Amino acid sequence: MKEGISRRTFGKLAGLATFGALGSGSELAAQDQESRPVAPLKLGEEIVLEDAQLHVSFDSLSGALVRMERKSGTWVIERRPELGASFRLFVPLSKQRDNFIYGTKQKAVSVQKIAPNKVRMQWENLLSEHGGVMPIGFTGTVTLENGKLTFNAELENNSDCFVEAVDYPYFGDFSPPSKDSVVEAHHMWVGALSTDSIYPRFDNAKGYWGVRWPTRTIESNQSQYCLLQAIQPGTAAQPGTATEQGIYVAIEDPEIRYLMEFTFEQHPGVVDWVYDDVPKEDEISGWPVHLDFRTCHFVFAHPHSKVQFAPIVMQPYDGDWHAGLDVYKQWRETWFKKPRIAPWAEDVHSWLQLRVDGAEQDYSVPYRDLVTYATECAENGVTAIQVVGWNKGGQDGGDPSLDTDPGLGTWQEMHDAVAQSQAKGVHMILFGKPIFADMSTDYYKKELYKYEAVDPYGNKYESGGYAYTTPTQLAGINQRRRAIMDVCSPAYRDIATHEFEKILALGAHGWLFDEVMQHNGVLYNFAQGHGYTAPGYLFNADIPLVKQFRAAADKVNADFLFAGEGPGDWLMRYYYLGYYRIGTATRHALRYLDSKAPLMAAVRGFNAREEVNLCLLYRYIISYEPFNFKGHVTDFPLTLDYGKKVDALRRKYRKFLWDAEFRDTLDGTASANGPFKYSVFIAEDKKRAVVVMNLEPARPITVNVVVPGVTNFVVATPEEQDAQPNSGTLTVPARSAAVFMEA
């Protein structure tokens, strides 16, 4: 008997684990057909890859990954060989979509070590659950090099069916380092690090009651990487000595060819759904307790086609999430090329966001009045205005049209207002949203409907639209619904480019692509006749779309600024200036990855010192947004005055606060007798600075800063900008900040 599986449990597994017989008749019918098949009872030899960091074993009969151990971190990741897995294919049949091919039900044609650090596994003529043997071949190649495990794969689909999704690699028993560990899954979404609990608590996030086991997924259109972060608590003898290690898992595909999901399934379930506790034992009620972890590739392989998969890499690391991001940063440097960006956008500066017309035609700021706002901005050191609702249809209306609106004035008035504003040193940035179509417009009804994204059943995808301002809209009665446009279509990309060129004709210095980080949840278009072989992955087509935009802009102004709301990291090669809304709990993953990217954050309050301090702490451009971007920059003088002080401080000490490497909470520490936040910067001359903000609303706190090897600092604050000598201790007033700089 294998250790960790009882005779009762092993008996249950036995009915699910033979090679050819299952899936073909009465034996399977007698079993619970939704139970995930497990590895063969009779395991073959172990084919081993090993280096100083990892030991990885594959079963010679099935090709299943049966063991994985991190030697340096004492983490047995895949613990029980009998729960090992290899792959899973989803191959819908014409009359039964629920048809899977499980790797553990196949006998591998070959499992061999083709190099000292490389194993190749091949499977052919695969047995499916409901379609019999299918002429499909699958090859996996695993390489271990300096602690980095790389999974490559190829699918050869000689069947008459689509292979919609492939799970590979597949861990059938992904285990925590110990029973008292905490394991979390981190990923980046809109510039920040998000967290899901994996162990000891696991709550269901997908499928509502449709899934059999609690399930969570992380989509690659949000993040190309997932950090599996393990925290080992201190002992009773040494409390507070927790250690951290993790496993970096990523898809290496900067062109975003298809969707991939990091998928977690907790088997057979949790102890109680009130607390979502994972059973601590190896079995419960006779069922094995184990976590399935796999990466699911939505390749939609056509009949009689071959597909090369994007590589999946796994690499262990020591430390917290910063160490995991260091792995991603190293790979990012191999493909990320910073785009050309206007010098003014890289300097210390601030913006005003201004809505000139809402969704219900309030026409609050005629084009000719934009110059008044620009004059106020110029007088107060604000260098750019993002103009929202300027196009026909108002805020989030009329998309993707970028025509001017007669209700706001003439095209010439808008053109002249842009020119006059920019002559004052205030750059005009026009808002656009080319991935949606307002379904209430004639433009959509007569033309754009031809290019909308369609689901597998021929139904159009659509968004409910937004509800703004008026009672009828706020009640959700008359918002303008939006079709999701198929940006995979070359013809639609040409339409969107033609609309974009209208911004260029107005002479603006840039544009901001709102909602560039999403397609309202739509991933693929399945409509035929759009100029390519469907289905098309919309996130992949974002790249040729922006390349067309960039080519059009370069003909007019090579310094034309491309900005976007929370662009995915792969799009930052084009939309380098990103717009975000942040808070005290935000973990600034993107800032850690790119210290000097021009990231911008909303500042909305009427005495928004905390919002401004966060911009100082994390090197964000200030976007002033009084009245939810419907006011003058002078409408909130307290916020404006403090923001001007912070920007002046950044200009004076830009060596530390603007041109330096952002290290978050690494390379220095801070402590205080009250709530606070801090961050560390390293200047080009290797001198360090620590920025501390006091989160107390009404009282000062005493802050102590420690930087290894540094005993003498100078300190400056927004209110007292002349730096004074300091030993590392300072009383910081309520709602203020201080900068400790290495002397």
Image (cartoon, helix red, strand yellow):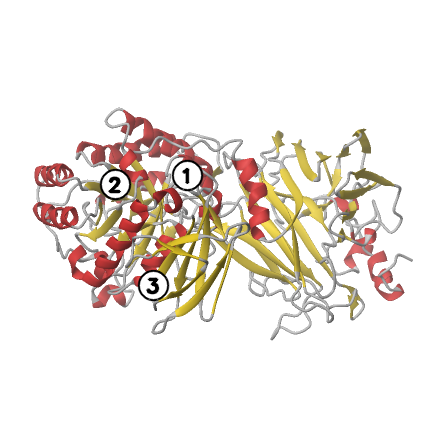
Dot 3 surroundings within 10 Å: few (below 14), some, or many (20 or more)? many
Residue under label 3, please give it. 736
Local secondary structure at mark 3: loop
Q: Quadrant of the N terminus?
A: bottom right
User: Which is more foreground, mark 3 or mark 2?
Assistant: 3
State the image quarter where residue 409 is shown: top left
Give the camera-side residue of 180 and 173: 180
Mark 2 or mark 1, which is nearer the start of the sequence?
Answer: 2
Q: Position of residue 680 (x, y in %)?
A: 46, 51
Mark 2 or mark 3, which is nearer the start of the sequence?
Answer: 2
Residue 525 is left or right of residue 44, and the answer is left
Local secondary structure at mark 1: helix
What amino acid is found at the position of numbered circle 1 in the picture? Met
Give the camera-side residue of 135 and 652: 652
Local secondary structure at mark 2: helix
Residue under label 2, please give it. 446
Q: Which mark is residue 572?
A: 1
* CA–CA distance in space, label 3 to label 2: 56 Å
Q: Position of residue 304 (x, y in %)?
A: 62, 30
Give the camera-side residue of 663 and 723: 723
* CA–CA distance in space, label 1 to label 2: 34 Å
Answer whether labels 1 and 3 touch (C-beta < 8 Å).
Answer: no
Image point (51%, 31%), residue name: 335
Answer whether labels 1 and 2 touch (C-beta < 8 Å).
Answer: no
User: Which is more foreground, mark 1 or mark 3?
Assistant: 3
Residue 206 visible at all: no
